Amino acid sequence: MLLIKSGTAAAVALTAGIGLGAAGPAQAATPLDRFHHQTITWRACATGPGDQMGEQMDAAGARCATVLVPMDYRRPQGRTLTIALSRIKATDSSRRRGVLLLNPGGPGGSGLSMTLLGKEMPEVAARYDLVGMDPRFVGRSTPISCRWQTDTFLRSAGPDRRTFDEGVRLAEQLAAGCAKGNLQTLPYATTRNTARDMDVIRAALGEQKLSYLGYSYGTYLGATYLQMFGSRADRVVLDSAVDPRVYGPRMFSRAAPAIDAALRRWASWTASHDKEYGLGGTRDAVLATVEKINRHPVEIGGYRVDAHVVPYWLFARLYSDGPQSYAVLAEEARALSRGGETPPPASLKEFLDGLFTGAGEASDRAGTAILCGDRAAPRDPATYYRDIQRHRAAEPLFGPLVHNITPCAFWPVKPLEAPTRVGNSVPALIVGAAGDPATPYPGQQAMHRALTGSRMITLNGAFRHGVYLAAGNACVDTKVTSYLVDGVLPGKDVTCGRPAV
């Protein structure tokens, strides 16, 4: 995946910043002081034998720690959570700028290993302590444990009412799987609370300001931080920005045309490699093969791949537009086009294992709680079915995916706060691909308009999600690095070109 109302005096104080650490030297003590001034104990990252991620971070010089935060910021004297952090100190202490907090998106994505990005951006790593964070309820932070046998709720509604009703039952089951044992914590799984956690981390690290690099959902988290704590933000980069007006349980509802355009781009590439994959010698022939796969279920690797699965599989594989990623999708499509006559490629087996058993990271389990906690979803399944039917003619393949019902329709708790209304003039740099299938370009532009102090770098000719350090584009990478190091936004929006694949 990429991804609040109390009338109490405490909540009003929160909104005003009184309980959020808006403290200066002359201010009276606040209930959050014990969190802001806590001692952080750094240690090795590996938790034991076989912890490959921890071993990689240790080898890179990272240290790990936990920070204590309130579960409910309206009642900071109550139950607490632990937030897992990793840090690699600035390699040039004489020129150290401060802290750069990193988030990979989700919601539900672990950020601990993002400190390893330092080797990809040495100039930035020289100036900043790179800090990764597992947001509340994610990864090594205090968890929410959803009892799922899948790694994501994302499925297509399929071709008809019967298949849609199958999806309704799955969504209801998944909501129940998150509710069991978590009813006391679910209300506090929100982006606004994660932003508050970020500010506790800033204070506990002894920093006056916080710099930030966030991707995908991480752009919404970053924008929320700017909205709530803008005076404490330093240099902020938002890559592959989410539309702040749409973010929530239905955040993909406008994505079908962009996904379809990315699929067509891949189909053109695949047609040019027909001798290798045999999926068709023209773009339309390849698309016809894909449509056949979608219409005719395949038993492969012990799993049934049908119209619930195929659109999501395509979407997940279209996040990158490089030749290697295109080749993986083509190999998987070739195996499916043969009707499961041969074992699936290892990549497809891994994908299906996650989808049907929950193997792997399964970040959407925690991420779903955040989506549902941030914004309420329509409760009536008929609402979703009508929406799917309205879009079916124009969006035959991906419409039933992006308009489908989610577990949020059956969520057992209501959001405690209204969604964040992003609109401020705090400086920020927004980066995005013009053909992004997951956070379509019009939504990126909506974030740019909402952040009136921002500038935007657009990578033309790219059909991918994630640009800085991910697309291999020197124009983008140089400009973003320059902003993080020198602090000067471009004088105007910038467009970078990309060579044809």
Image (tube, grey):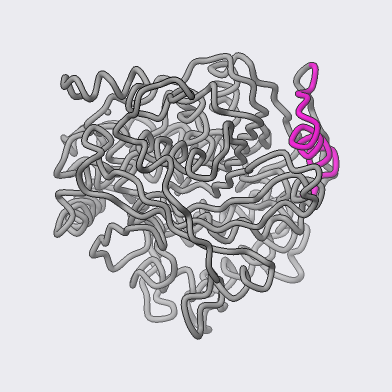
> Which quadrant of the structure image shows residue 491?
top right
- Left-right relation of 282 to 384: right
Q: Position of residue 255 (x, y in %)?
A: 49, 36
Residue in front for this viewpoint, 333 or 194: 194
Q: Position of residue 211 (x, y in %)?
A: 62, 36
Residue in front for this viewpoint, 268 or 193: 193
- Does residue 399 appear anywhere in the picture? no
Rendered residue at 33%/72% (across/down): 357
Q: Is residue 362 above or below residue 405?
A: below
Residue in front for this viewpoint, 93 or 11: 93
Rendered residue at 79%/38% (across/down): 476
Rendered residue at 32%/48% (across/down): 368
Which portion, as a residue range, is magenta? 472-491
- Does residue 133 appear anywhere in the picture? yes
- Left-right relation of 466 to 409: right
Residue in front for this viewpoint, 494 or 11: 11
Q: Position of residue 478 (x, y in %)?
A: 84, 39
Magenta highlight: main SS: helix
Q: How many marks?
A: 0
* In magenta segment, residue 487: yes
* In magenta segment, residue 318: no
- Left-right relation of 255 to 79: right
Rendered residue at 75%/59% (across/down): 323
Q: Position of residue 307 (x, y in %)?
A: 38, 57
Task: Point out the residue furthest to the front here.
Answer: 26
- Left-right relation of 270 to 443: right
